[in-house]
């Protein structure tokens, strides 16, 4: 299938990037060597390019109209191969042959050639290994495409460079050249994870002020959080509209992001985890949590302010509770308000429509550019939901279904699972923020989770209603991974502290789960050893202080 740079919905994009990490870590563990650090810092960058922005065709890697991706930091190969595989260039299972004799997936990628199908990798445009060169290659392609402008004026060239390799003089020579030739078909992304092979970049060869340097070389510079796909999408969109200048996107990332004991640790630049940890690591990758504050909670205040306050705290989404006064005994706001709020943030909008007859109004919410739209099972029939789902998928929006505390999961949902991204299991009767959590919904949440997983559901379970620092772990244990929090975030005076507290509780729940898993696999003390520096702050809550202390 040709990816034309649209129609990739938020949660599906997140899920595919999760799959990239899952495959990459399996490949590295099987091989006993490889680079998890760089694979994971660049996962969102490569994933967003391949699954959302770039024009490319996995069944025809040499398609003339494609955009180009040059992975200059080629040691991130496990992540790159996994991205290509998840995009459809070859079966992901092949990742298990990483670095093995006879495999085409070697430690550094080999450029695809139709004449050498068994020795080169479909989708790879550049054989990397020596650092600092990829940008020059990208410039060559971008210049050639400029000369060819009439025929291929749509081709873009994306180059990923590392901050370690930015020590190379050739990067800066290339930087000058791209500025000189005004290569506005070239977008370079710097994976700014601040760690290189031997330590922290700022100790070895400081790069700061990075943005000023690139701007001084006549580049248009943007800066993003390189693990927030919505920011990357946004910057790439802006980059496509820059004229007469090359674009540099400085993506602030965390080396090893996704596995907490590997994160921001130079030791994990190029080290494989022991194979016996793989299952636990996969569990960690699959347990990523998202926090979604509900802006109807707390004092009446303008919604833009409320959004700004939680954006600063690094929350994942904004939960928008639409209430029509009929489906629920309260009225909040409608699509026009969402439309007005849309330009105020790049954070994904998680719209929860508590309205009668959602099908009749769905277009307004699509036009308001929500990222997730959830409607209630009590408010639509199977056919209506299927139509809603289809329209959302076509618009690149994640579809969701919500069920009230008293409602059982409708049987017809089994027929809609393939393209379902969210199930909200309400833990209060909808209508108001600030209600008390209903623990009686937990068995249902757990059953829904188990049942749906069995039937191939790959979306998220969202807990909504009364989630706070005392209840989050219960919903987590029942399988929820998106947490709506209204009163818990906006109800007290301290938004900063509240978000930290929620994240902390999610982290404790995760560590508990992973510890249990490691016990089942008979690797508990070994796991605790690898994880010691992460576990220390939670030891008390997990009741493992002595056990942890004894681990050297
Ligand atoms: C309830 C809404 C919830 C709620 C969340 O009808 O769907 O999103 O407002 O707020 P808290 O966390 O305060 O229950
Ligand atoms: Zn809600």
Image: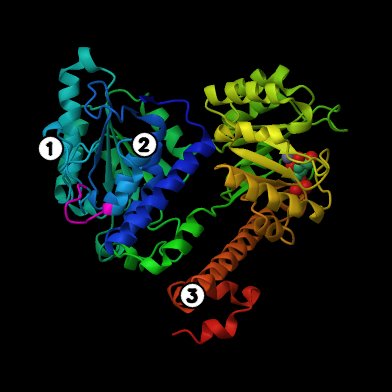
Tally the marks.
Answer: 3
Circle 2 is placed at which residue position? 87
Left or right placement of residue 281 versus residue 325 in this view: left
Camera-side mark, 2 or 3: 3
The magenta region covers: 97-104
Camera-side mark, 2 or 1: 1
- Which label's residue is closer to the chain start, 1 or 3? 1
Q: Tell me, yes or no, whether the two marked residues, 1 and 3, touch with CB atoms within 8 Å.
A: no
* Residue farthest along the top direction in this orientation: 150
What is the C-alpha distance between the residues marked 1 and 3? 44 Å
Secondary structure beneath dot 1 equals helix
Residue 465 at what x, y percent from top left? 76, 47
Which residue is at 16% across, 37% downward? Answer: 117
- Which label's residue is closer to the chain start, 2 or 1? 2
* Residue farthest along the left direction in this orientation: 115
Q: Is residue 442 above or below residue 366?
A: below
Which residue is at 64% across, 62% downward? Answer: 505
Q: Residues within 10 Å of mark 2 (few under 14, many from 20)?
A: many
Does the magenta portion include 100?
yes
- Which label's residue is closer to the chain start, 2 or 3? 2
Residue 550 at what x, y percent from top left? 50, 87
Q: Is residue 177 above or below residue 29?
A: above
Which residue is at 61% across, 66% downward? Answer: 508
**Image quarter for residue 183?**
top left
Secondary structure beneath dot 3 equals loop
Circle 3 is placed at which residue position? 522
């Amino acid at each position: 299938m040709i990816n034309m740079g649209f129609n990739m919905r938020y949660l599906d994009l997140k899920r595919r990037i999760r799959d990239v990490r899952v495959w990459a870590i399996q490949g590295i563990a099987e091989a006993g060597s490889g680079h998890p650090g760089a694979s994971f810092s660049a996962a969102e960058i490569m994933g967003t390019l391949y699954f959302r922005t770039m024009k490319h065709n996995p069944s025809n890697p040499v398609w003339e109209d494609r955009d180009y991706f040059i992975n200059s930091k080629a040691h991130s190969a496990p992540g790159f191969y996994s991205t290509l595989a998840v995009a459809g260039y070859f079966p992901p299972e092949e990742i298990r042959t990483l670095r093995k004799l006879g495999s085409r997936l070697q430690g550094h990628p080999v450029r695809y050639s139709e004449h050498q199908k068994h020795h080169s990798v479909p989708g790879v445009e550049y054989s990397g290994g020596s650092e600092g060169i990829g940008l020059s290659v990208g410039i060559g392609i971008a210049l050639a495409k400029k000369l060819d402008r009439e025929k291929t004026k749509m081709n873009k060239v994306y180059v990923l460079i590392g901050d370690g390799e930015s020590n190379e003089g050739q990067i800066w020579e290339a930087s000058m050249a791209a500025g000189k030739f005004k290569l506005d078909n070239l977008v370079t992304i710097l994976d700014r994870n601040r760690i290189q092979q031997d330590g922290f970049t700022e100790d070895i060869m400081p790069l700061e002020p990075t943005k000023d340097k690139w701007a001084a070389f006549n580049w248009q510079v943007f800066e993003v959080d390189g693990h927030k796909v919505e920011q990357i999408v946004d910057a790439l969109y802006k980059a496509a509209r820059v004229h007469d200048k090359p674009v540099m996107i400085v993506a602030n990332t965390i080396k090893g992001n996704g596995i907490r004991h590997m994160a921001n640790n130079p030791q994990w630049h190029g080290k494989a985890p022991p194979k016996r940890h793989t299952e636990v690591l996969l569990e960690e990758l699959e347990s990523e949590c998202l926090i979604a504050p509900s802006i109807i909670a707390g004092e009446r205040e303008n919604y833009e302010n409320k959004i700004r306050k939680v954006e600063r705290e690094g929350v994942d989404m904004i939960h928008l509770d639409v209430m029509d006064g009929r489906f629920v005994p309260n009225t909040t706001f409608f699509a026009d308000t969402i439309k007005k709020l849309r330009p105020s943030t790049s954070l994904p909008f998680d719209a929860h429509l508590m309205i009668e007859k959602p099908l009749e109004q769905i277009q307004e919410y699509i036009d308001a550019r929500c990222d997730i739209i959830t409607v209630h099972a009590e408010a639509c029939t199977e056919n209506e939901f299927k139509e809603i789902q289809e329209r959302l998928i076509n618009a690149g929006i994640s579809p969701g279904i919500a069920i009230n505390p008293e409602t059982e999961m409708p049987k017809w949902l089994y027929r809609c699972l393939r393209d379902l991204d969210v199930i909200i299991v309400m833990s209060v009767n909808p209508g108001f923020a600030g209600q008390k959590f209903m623990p009686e919904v937990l068995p249902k949440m757990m059953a829904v989770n188990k049942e749906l997983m069995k039937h191939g559901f790959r979306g998220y379970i969202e807990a909504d209603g009364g989630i706070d620092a005392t209840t989050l772990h219960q919903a987590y244990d029942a399988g929820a991974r998106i947490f709506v929090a209204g009163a818990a975030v906006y109800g007290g005076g301290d938004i900063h502290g509240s978000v930290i507290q929620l994240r902390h509780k999610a982290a404790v729940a995760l560590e508990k789960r992973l510890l249990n898993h490691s016990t089942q696999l008979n690797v508990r003390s070994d796991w605790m050893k690898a994880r010691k520096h992460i576990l220390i702050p939670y030891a008390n809550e997990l009741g493992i202080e002595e056990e942890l202390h004894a681990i050297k």
